[in-house]
Each structure stands twice: as structure tokens, then as C-alpha cells.
Image (tube, coloured by chain):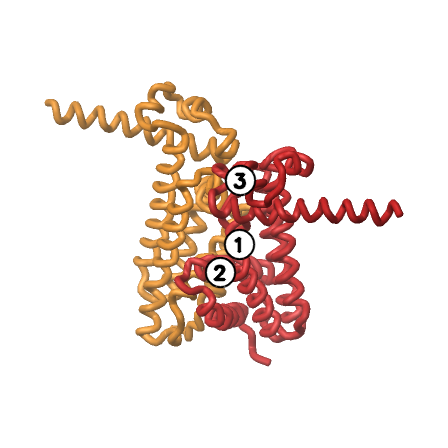
Chain colours: A red, B orange
Amino acid sequence: MPYRSSEKTRKKKDAKRTAMMQAAVGVFAEKGYHAATVRDIVSAADVAVGTFYFYFPDKETLFVHLYEETADFLLQAIDQAVRRQTTLPEQVQNGIQAYVNIALYEPAVIHLLLVGGVGAVPSLTSRQKEFRERLVAIWLRPLETAVTQKTIPPQNCRRAAEAIAGAHDEVILNLLSHADPDSEAENVIEELTLFTLRAVAYKGG
Amino acid sequence: MPYRSSEKTRKKKDAKRTAMMQAAVGVFAEKGYHAATVRDIVSAADVAVGTFYFYFPDKETLFVHLYEETADFLLQAIDQAVRRQTTLPEQVQNGIQAYVNIALYEPAVIHLLLVGGVGAVPSLTSRQKEFRERLVAIWLRPLETAVTQKTIPPQNCRRAAEAIAGAHDEVILNLLSHADPDSEAENVIEELTLFTLRAVAYKGG
């Protein structure tokens, strides 16, 4: 059964790729992009150096893939959380909750997207811009719907979405610097939801 | 007159240092930190290579100084704009106006502080954190005063200041990507001021 065999091989390869990607997140977060070496990554992933070069020509390529896949992961989580709800307060709260959850369980992911790496890898600048643009788009849709439904007054929704995206990033980055992020998470979600709804003049349900 | 003579020498030296710093902002913004060379910087500043090494041991040191001085420049401008006013709406509007003005006239400065370089230079991570912390502190003071004066309700002012700082950064970064930033600036100031005052539930004067 050649299909199953090749499928099995593919899965095995994917597992190695995933292991290297996961290891790289930790290595970059710990050592920084420049100090981190391919050797550090393969060592943390427990794979051979040759395996690395089977998948990636160099450290930079892995880093760009890592950034893109990490951005997709976070954006999809927030987007799905928002889309699961119908009213603006629920959408805002759920979106923030999803963001906070990922920040708590995968702080290195947030560090990678918001702080580390950009500047280190010139080709990442356009990816970062795209990541920010997609984050703004996630908030734009519910705001425009809310204007249509008259639960918020007419306003420049695009600008408000930018401000919301920036506000959330900064608060969540600060949460990760908190002495006990887990115990603070509930407060962050509650306060940031209120901040966001007030900012767009939500009139209440 | 040895004093005047040495003073004159010092000023001449400072002028060269300033010329290199100003040139470096443009060079880094255009080429990115890694592609930029000491040769590019001295060429743009019209000084000899030896002059560079009289002031800085290497490109990274210049970059760290540049980041710190640029951060000081922006933070002082915003802080002074806020302190010149007494009511929260004036403080918010004036602070945003100062930020927008610098962004319009020195976009490379904003790029340097918010996007470029961090990650490229590991020693910059702590400076970036300090910059963000000082920006939050600028907004914290007027919010606490407003709570005391009961023009905004009791709230977690620290968290609100973080959200405000993040919101402003993101909107101003987007302004710089706008096709005609100058014509859009007034709208940004007006809308972002309103967003900020609503977010903290300002009750009006």
C-alpha cells in the first residue's frame, strides 16, 4: 500500500518539522535570534543536524516560517473566538479571552510576534505588517456590524480597530511581565473588555 | 583662553556626533539595521570613518545610543505637551498632537522606536521595555489626577494607561502608512482623543 506508506513517512517528517518549530520558539525566546544556533534548535528538538537542513536552508528561513505559522495560529484563535459570538460585548470579551489564554500558555509565541525578531530578520518586516493588518481586520468586522445595528454610534471603525488592536497588544505584553500572570488574567479580560466597549461608545444591550 | 577653546572643540565634536546620529536614523530606516554599514553612516554624515570610531566602538553602540536619545526626545515631547495642560481632554489631545507631529516630521524616529531594530540588537530589548514603561507613566499621571478630581470614575489607571499607550502607537504607525499622512493627521488627533476619553469614561468638563 504505497499511499499509506508515503502518508506514514510524511507524518513522521511533519512530526520532526513540528518538533523543530516548537523547539525553535523556546530557543529564540531564551537566547534571542542572533545567539540562537541551528545546533541549539536541533539539540532541543532531539533531531539530527541533517534533518534541519532537509526542511530549511538556514535559520532565517525557519524563523520566517515560524513567524508566519505563529501569527496564523494566534489570529485564527482570536478570529474564531470573535466569530462564535453575536453581540459586541461577547465578541470583545471572547476575543480578548482567546488572546490572553494563548499569552498565558504560550508566552514565547507572544514574545515572538510582538517583540522578538523583527528587525533581526529584514524579510520579516512585511510579515509583521501583514500580521498587524489582519489583527485590525478581526476587530473591524464586528465594529462595522455594531454601527449597522446601531449598538455603537457611527465612527471611523478602521481607526477604532487599529486602536483596539494596539491597546490589547500592550496590555497583554504587560500581563506577561506581571509577577503572577495567571491570577491577573481575569482582571485583564474584564478591564480590557470594558475599556474597549467604552472606547467605541457601546450603548448597552 | 583654554576654556573657550576646549568648549569650541567640544561643540565641534558634538556637531559631528549629531550629524552621524541624524544620518544613522535615515540610513537604518532605509537599509535596515543589518544591511546598514558604518561606511553608509559616515558617508551620509559627510565625516571620516575615523571620526565614527572616535565616538563609537561599533555600529551596535551607535544604535543603542540612537535608540535611547530618540526615545528621550519623543517621550519628553509628549510629556511636556501633556504637562502644559490641566484638564484631561486637553492633556490627551495635546499629547496625541505632539506624538503625531513628531511622526509626521520624523517618521524614521517612529519607525526606529516601534518597528526597526529591536531583535536585531539583543541589548535593545531592555531599552525598549523601558521606553514602553515611560510612555505608560506619561498617561498614568493625568488619569490618576482625573480619578481624584472625579472627572473619570475609579478604575485601574495603570491598565488604562497601558491600553492608551498601545492604542496610540498602533494608530500612529498606521498613519505613517497612509497615502497622505499630513492631510489625515487632524482626523487622527480628533478621533484618537475621543477614543481615549471614552475609553476611560470621561464625564465631560
Dot placed on the residue nearer the N-terminal end, 3 or 1:
3
| In the displayed structure image, the side of residue A202 where residue B51 appears, left or right | left
Dot placed on the residue nearer the N-terminal end, 3 or 2:
3
> Where is residue B63, by image quadrant?
top left
Q: Do labels 2 and 1 share a chain?
A: yes
Q: Is residue A73 above or below residue A100?
A: above
Given the image, on which type of amino acid does mark 2 rest? Ile
Q: Given the image, what chain letter belongs to the residue carrying mark 1?
A: A
Mark 3, secondary structure of its residue: helix
Dot placed on the residue nearer the N-terminal end, 2 or 1:
1
Quadrant assignment for the N terminus of chain B = top left
Q: Given the image, what chain letter belongs to the residue carrying mark 3?
A: A
Residue identified by numbered label 1:
A110
Q: Of all residues shown, which one is farthest toward the bottom?
A: A205
Q: Residues within 10 Å of mark 1 (few under 14, many from 20)?
A: many
How far from the left and from the top, in percent, is residue B190? 48, 60
Quadrant assignment for the C terminus of chain B = bottom left
> Where is residue B123, by image quadrant?
top left
Mark 1, secondary structure of its residue: helix
Tag 3 and tag 1, C-beta contact below 8 Å: no
How far from the left and from the top, in percent, is residue A157? 60, 62
How far from the left and from the top, in percent, is residue A162? 55, 57
For this rendering, which residue is in front, A133 or B12? Answer: A133
- Point out the frontmost of discs 3 and 1: 3
Residue identified by numbered label 3:
A40
Residue identified by numbered label 2:
A172
Tag 2 and tag 1, C-beta contact below 8 Å: yes
How far from the left and from the top, in percent, is residue A120? 51, 38
Q: Given the image, what chain letter belongs to the residue carrying mark 2?
A: A
